[in-house]
Image (cartoon, rainbow, N blue to C red):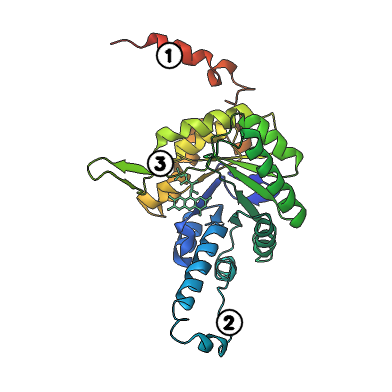
Amino acid sequence: MVDLATNFMGIKLKNPLVVSASTISGHVDTVKAAEAAGAAGLVIRSLFEEQIALESQRMADQISQYNHISPEASSYFPAVKHGGPKEHLMWVEKTRKAVKMPLFASLNAVTPGAWVQYAKELADTGVNGLEINFYYVAADPEKSGSEIEKQLYEVVEKVRAAVTLPIAVKLSPYFTSVVNVVRELEKRGVNSVVLFNRFLQPDIDAENESIFNEMTYSTSAELRLPLRHVAILYGRTKLDLVLNTGVHTGIDAVKGLLAGASVVQFTAALLKNGIPYLSTMLVQLQDWMTEHNYKTVDDFRGSLSQKRCDDPFAFERAQYVKLLLKQSL
Ligand SMILES: Cc1cc2nc3c(=O)[nH]c(=O)nc-3n(C[C@H](O)[C@H](O)[C@H](O)COP(=O)(O)O)c2cc1C
């Protein structure tokens, strides 16, 4: 019998498979189903400050549209205000009570005050850790890459000072030097980095000359990007590495662990195949370990990282040039 136990941010997990932030955490039934299928933990979908701001604005607009009919009437009634993050916080608390597995809250804020306030409020719900979901679309030509990084570090410093919970930072893959960003995050006392978030890109409908957004799920082919960065980072940082994006099978999880991930996170595999599929992924991981004579996950974690593999250049440019030269019609 193989032992899948994994230490993640000081938390003992029964295996390295964690459900990433998504709509799976939107129903108690699906969260329970993930636990029953063997998930070691689950990240609850993000609390988005922008969504709260948008809902508050809509509510204020709806109330004010009747002001012209009876302006004085609005002063008779107590002011109606949007509840802010309350609904989300209550949801996190409810989820916490529904399952025993470790749960992680996720936060995506915009203003410095909200990063701190919401982080504290999420920490008070009883979750085991906090994931900072930092995403910035660089569309302002006046703003340099280092300014955007500085913004990330300021957020991390503020949240670190506000909560004692373990913190993971979920990054986008669009930083020029991911290794450098991770080193800077480590200096600021975070416990883990999640590589990477996957963002939906808008598309263009050429026929109707319009822009549209549609949900597309990842495939295993997308695993290679986080795999490369996890492999480069393993042994170069003390932070726990989380591989996220493109994990669709137990063998994809094996690849992440060989590269050096402490845990792998996934969502699309479960949205496509149903939550019980997680148990199939676990069996695939166990079977692979048995076939390869590994008793624990630590026996092979990071063995194909850049530091430990036979060909360190495989993760850099050299192999790329070789491959390009090999291609012919
Ligand atoms: C329907 C859906 C909702 C998501 N919601 C969130 C979210 O609230 N916060 C977040 O950080 N990531 C969110 N994600 C991104 C996932 O957590 C994950 O990073 C991404 O889907 C890549 O993993 P995958 O290849 O296993 O799908 C969402 C993804 C999907 C498909």
Q: Is mark 2 within 8 Å of ligand 1?
A: no
Quadrant where the image shows the C terminus = top left
Q: Amino acid at mark 3?
A: Ser
Which x, y percent locates residue 126? 66, 64
| Nearer to the camera, 170 or 135 | 135
Q: Is residue 296 visible?
A: no
Can you say whether 100 is above or below 135 in the image? below
Please indicate whether residue 165 sits to the left or right of residue 286 in the image. Answer: right
| Quadrant in the picture for residue 283 | top left
Which label sits in the foreground, 1 or 2?
2
Q: How many marks?
A: 3
C-alpha span from label 2 to label 3: 45 Å
Q: Which residue is mark 3?
A: 218
Q: Earlier in the sequence, mark 3 or mark 1?
A: 3
Q: Is mark 3 within 8 Å of ligand 1?
A: yes
Q: Is residue 236 visible?
A: yes
Q: Amino acid at mark 1?
A: Leu
| Nearer to the camera, 39 or 103 | 103
In the drawing, what numbered circle is on residue 251?
none
Q: Earlier in the sequence, mark 1 or mark 2?
A: 2
Please indicate whether residue 205 sits to the left or right of residue 234 in the image. Answer: left
Q: Which residue is mark 2?
A: 79
